[in-house]
């Protein structure tokens, strides 16, 4: 037990320093755990290992004892383009025309899950990173006189503690307590100082952190021998404020993690082939710092950055549809593939602030495999390709039809896993 605690502590530290963020379904990951990532992120009705708890805490009641490790290499490619010259008129905020790419492109993201079953009772602990926002533009996009770079970095780390119980041989319930840690930094926003309630807590203040908690509940059931159903709901994770950025985020630096739900089915077509389908909804609009729109008229009426109704990123809620398949092949091989689609959350009127957070990916294609080794050990692999997506809209802080801002993103992820 002492050795297990030491290993978990070491991984916790590794996660804190390496889980620089990604943007897939908005800023949530497309899936959690190597096996589930290979199946398009599906799995609420198809538990595969201890990391299944992130999607549905009830499913792990049927898995027995396991230890699961994963390490992902994530490659997001982000850029913005400004078309049209600035008008230079009073009370406007034009941007320099051209295309700028984000410099930081590669991130390592580890994860850990442990599952222990005692009769009808199962206990699980998992450490993992979520998505997030990260941009690193090597230019003063907003003409900050104190910074030659522009961007943000939001990292999120989660520790989940789960209790699951079998109701009978075919059904289970689960509940997870979630403890979250966030780090955030912003650079290059000083020229928004006149629009901030506190311009000393707007930008260039180094890394700040916040902590919080939430809960996820889930149900899993085998309705028939070849058909399973799963569903789960995660509450909003209530975070403490980023005090050093109280002049940037709405509600004086508040940045909660939005509530979401997932439901799905798994159908065993035959002994070797299982098909899965999930639907997920993420309530970005329920977090003011994410969902509040940027309305330039608000600045004229005394509503500033950092206020309760202050501008956010203007994100809409997302509905994501996922499908996956697993095919068992002889000699311990399992092959997986999947696909997901979710309309990106950024309206065309919200281009200006979302230069900092261009989470516009809509489609993911995935594949992977597992190979059984001796003594119930397994190795896993998953690959994800986020298809390139570009959106465009007006610079709402310029004269009408003066400038267009385009946001573009593509991404890849490769993960290896090991379990026993």
Image (spheres, rainbow, N blue to C red):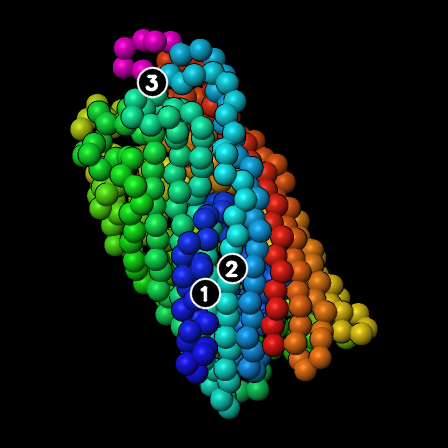
Left or right relative to 292: residue 261 = right
* Near-viewer residue (35 or 418): 418
Is residue 275 in view? no
Asked whether residue 230 is drawn in magenta, I would say no
Q: Local crowd at mark 3 within 10 Å, few (<14), some, or many (≥20)?
A: some
- Please state the horizontal and vertical placement of residue 288, each as a whole percent of the image: 31, 44
Depicted 363 relative to depicted 6: above or below: above
Residue placed furthest toward the right: 330
Q: CA distance from mark 3 to mark 2?
A: 41 Å
Q: Residue at x 67, y 72 (%)?
A: 378
Q: Which residue is mark 2?
A: 110
Q: CA distance from mark 1 to mark 3?
A: 45 Å
Magenta region: 87-92
Q: Residue at x 47, y 36 (%)?
A: 358
Left or right relative to 209: residue 170 = right
* Near-viewer residue (212 or 302): 212
Q: How many marks?
A: 3
Left or right relative to 245: residue 372 = right
Query: Of label 3 and label 2, which has the lower sequence position?
Result: 3
Element under disc 2: strand
Is most of the magenta stretch helix, strand or loop?
Answer: loop
Q: Which residue is mark 3?
A: 93
Q: Residue at x 22, y 25 (%)?
A: 194
């Amino acid at each position: 037990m002492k050795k297990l605690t030491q290993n978990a502590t070491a991984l916790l530290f590794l996660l804190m320093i390496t889980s620089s963020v990604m943007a897939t379904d908005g800023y949530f990951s497309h899936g959690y755990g190597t096996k589930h990532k290979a199946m398009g992120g599906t799995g609420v009705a198809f538990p595969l290992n201890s990391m299944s708890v992130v999607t549905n805490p009830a499913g792990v009641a049927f898995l027995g004892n396991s230890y699961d490790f994963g390490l992902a290499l994530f490659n997001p490619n982000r850029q913005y383009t400004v078309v049209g010259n600035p008008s230079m008129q009073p009370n406007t905020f034009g941007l320099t025309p051209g295309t700028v790419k984000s410099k930081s492109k590669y991130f390592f993201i580890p994860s850990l899950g442990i599952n222990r079953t005692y009769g009808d009772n199962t206990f699980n602990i998992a450490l993992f990173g979520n998505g997030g926002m990260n941009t690193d533009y090597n230019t003063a996009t907003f003409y900050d006189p104190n910074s030659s770079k522009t961007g943000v970095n939001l990292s999120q780390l989660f520790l989940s503690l789960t209790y699951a119980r079998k109701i009978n041989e075919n059904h289970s319930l689960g509940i997870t307590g979630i403890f979250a840690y966030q780090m955030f930094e912003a650079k290059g926003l000083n020229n928004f100082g006149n629009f901030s309630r506190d311009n000393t807590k707007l930008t260039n203040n180094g890394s700040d952190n916040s902590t919080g908690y939430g809960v996820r509940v889930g149900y899993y059931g085998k309705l028939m021998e070849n058909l399973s159903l799963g569903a789960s709901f995660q509450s909003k994770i209530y975070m403490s404020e980023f005090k050093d950025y109280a002049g940037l985020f709405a509600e004086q630096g508040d940045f909660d993690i939005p509530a979401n739900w997932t439901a799905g089915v798994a159908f065993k077509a035959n002994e070797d082939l299982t098909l899965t389908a999930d639907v997920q909804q993420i309530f970005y609009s329920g977090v003011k710092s994410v969902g509040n729109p940027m309305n330039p008229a608000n600045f004229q009426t005394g509503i500033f950055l950092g206020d309760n109704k202050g501008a956010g990123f203007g994100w809409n809620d997302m509905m994501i549809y996922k499908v996956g398949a697993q095919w068992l092949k002889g000699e311990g091989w399992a092959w997986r593939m999947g696909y997901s689609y979710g309309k990106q959350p950024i309206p065309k009127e919200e281009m200006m602030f979302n230069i900092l957070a261009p989470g516009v990916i809509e489609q993911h294609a995935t594949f992977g495999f597992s190979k059984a080794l001796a003594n119930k050990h397994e190795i896993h692999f998953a690959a994800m390709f986020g298809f390139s997506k570009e959106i465009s809209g007006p610079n709402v802080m310029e004269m009408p039809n003066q400038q267009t801002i385009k946001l573009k993103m593509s991404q890849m992820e490769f993960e290896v896993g090991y379990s026993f």
